Amino acid sequence: MKRTPMIAGNWKMFKTGPEAVQTALRLVAGCRDVTDVDIMIAPAFVALSLVAQIVKNTPVRLGAQNLYFEKQGAFTGEISADMLKAAGAAYVIIGHSERRQHFFETDEAVCKKIRAAVTANLTPILCVGETEAQRDQEKTFLTLDKQVSDGLQGFGPDEIKDLILAYEPVWAIGTGKSASVAQVKEVHQYLRSLLEKRFSPDLAQTIRILYGGSVKPENIADLMRIEDVDGALVGGASLDADTFTKIIKFDTIL
Ligand code: PEP
């Protein structure tokens, strides 16, 4: 089955509003002619509305890096799905390993966040991935199974047909050490079979599974050649518009 590739950039806690605008302007100029790849950037919350103006009527879509699952209320410092939507976001990254690691986000919270995103009509990008210790102890599949099953607890296939899954091995994020083609192939195949078992064969074929972890222009082509890889979630290499544009245009180097 043909799935449209997606290249998504996670800008993490980098770039002020004006800096985000400058990068977005350069990215938009470089990607004007891209029609066969879905492009997304996720700047910091405070830059969302500013960047929304820049990417309007371009192939670049906007995403957020997190949300809080309650609709509104006395939750100082948090941002709701409706607020993100109103700021111009179409996507939201949920369960990134940095949130699980530094902010103690559990699979239960991840599940509530996905529910909030789906309810607000935001497309969730659910991040899953094992730590180095879990891989060394041969607990990679067990870890992923739990993250997917608990993170998507209670959802029917129709509710998550647009969801995007991102396999991000924790040991490959921001380390410069990407997972090997063989490792990515094995895990993406496993994730697709898990979706089939847990939900339905149709959903397993529809859902896009991105790879994330030290993706750069030098390794994107090899990654995109893997059958079950439908794109990439890019951190560090998405911060520079020219570098990110090279990754988005991976098919010119395939
Ligand atoms: C990420 O933040 O999701 C990520 C994959 O980071 P990096 O590309 O820098 O490894």
Image (cartoon, rainbow, N blue to C red):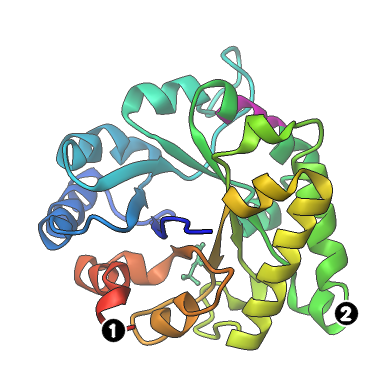
Marks 2 and 1, how far apart at CA = 34 Å
Residue at 71% across, 72% down: 187
Q: Is residue 240 above or below residue 88?
A: below
Res 152 → quadrant: top right
> Does residue 158 appear left or right of residue 42 in this picture?
right
Asked if one can make out residue 42 in the rendered structure from this viewpoint, the answer is yes
Whether disc 2's CB lies below 8 Å from ligand 1 is answered: no
Residue at 51% across, 74% down: 174
Q: Is residue 226 above or below residue 43?
A: below
Residue lying farthest front? 1
Q: Nearer the viewer, residue 174 or 200?
A: 200
Residue 124 forms part of the magenta stretch? no
Residue 176 rendering spot, x and y as whole percentages: 49, 84
Which mark is nearer the camera, 2 or 1?
Answer: 1
Res 101 → quadrant: bottom right
Whether disc 1's CB lies below 8 Å from ligand 1 is answered: no
Q: Is residue 72 above or below residue 111?
A: above
Asked if one can make out residue 180 in the rendered structure from this viewpoint, the answer is no
Residue type at the position of mark 1? Ile
Q: Nearer the viewer, residue 26 or 57?
A: 57
Residue 1 rendering spot, x and y as whole percentages: 54, 59
> Does residue 177 appear left or right of residue 26 in this picture?
right
Q: Which mark is residue 138?
A: 2
Residue at 24% across, 36% down: 52
Residue 121 rendering spot, x and y as whole percentages: 49, 25
Residue position marked by numbered label 1 in the rendering: 253
Residue type at the position of mark 2? Glu
Residue lying farthest top? 73
Q: Secondary structure at mark 2?
A: loop
The first of marks 2 and 1 along the sequence is 2
> Does residue 45 appear left or right of residue 103 in this picture?
left
Residue bounds of the magenta highlight: 112-117
